Image (cartoon, rainbow, N blue to C red):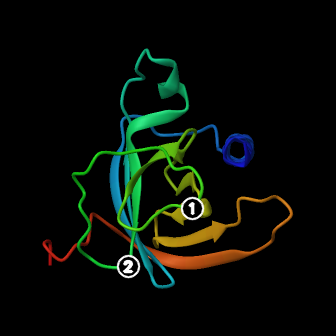
Amino acid sequence: MKKLSLLAIFIVVSCSSIPKTTISNHNIQLTCEVGTFIYYFNLQDEPPKSHPIYRLISENAWYIKSKNANPDLTQESSLAFGKDKLDKKYLLVKPYAVTEDSLFFTTLAGQWEVNRYNLKLLLTSPFPNDRDYLTGTCEYGFQTAQSK
């Protein structure tokens, strides 16, 4: 029950903060470093599917949290409930937004805002009363050991 409540909080909070001027038909891959973790994000817009679950998630919008530069980017995606595990691919919950200036999306770690000009990120807590935040940097593309 706590997991469903947490998911509902993420959806409500993220719905209220998404800008209305989004760019459609985008395909953006990011590698972001936050503390000791490396996050790999795939933000790909695609036509919505007819199944009701696809109103909440996007089949090609996912992330992987890792501590190394060698994640399996081809693994199957799943929904995250509870604490996200390392090196596992999770679907991003809608809505997420891609604008000319910023990227906005939510994971279990919190709400992400990435500046598209300098690729600096701000990660805020998913809980409204918690004022904690982290900062980090991103790069376009998947920066893995195979790509270097």
Using the image as rendered, state which of residue 47 and residue 98 is in the foreground.
47
Instruction: Give the vertical position of 49 relative to 45 (above or below).
Output: above
**In this view, 37 is above or below 79:** below
Give the mark toward the camera: 2 or 1.
1
Q: Is residue 110 above or below residue 21?
A: below
Q: Splitting the image into 4 quarters, where does residue 48 fall? A: top left
Q: Could you say which quadrant of the image residue 50 lies in?
A: top left
Which quadrant of the figure has residue 61?
top left
> Mark 2 or mark 1, which has the lower sequence index?
2
Between 70 and 95, the residue placed more toward the observer is: 70
* Residue plotted at (29% across, 45% down): 76
In the image, taking residue 143 as reference, residue 64 lies left or right, namely right
The quadrant of the picture occupied by the C terminus is bottom left
The kind of residue on which mark 1 rests is Lys
Circle 2: residue type: Lys
Task: Quarter of the image for the N terminus: give it.
Answer: top right
Is the residue marked by circle 2 packed among few (<14), some (14-19), or many (20+) residues within 10 Å?
some
Q: Residue at x 45, y 71 (%)?
A: 119
Residue 74 location, x and y as percent?
21, 52
Q: Which mark is residue 67?
A: 2
User: Circle 1 sits on which residue?
Assistant: 83
- Foreground: 20 or 42? 42
Percent x, y of residue 71 = 26, 67
Q: Report how far apart the C-alphas of labels 2 and 1 lie in the structure.
A: 15 Å
Q: Residues within 10 Å of mark 1 (few under 14, many from 20)?
A: few
Q: What percent of the width, then of the height, locates residue 78? A: 41, 44
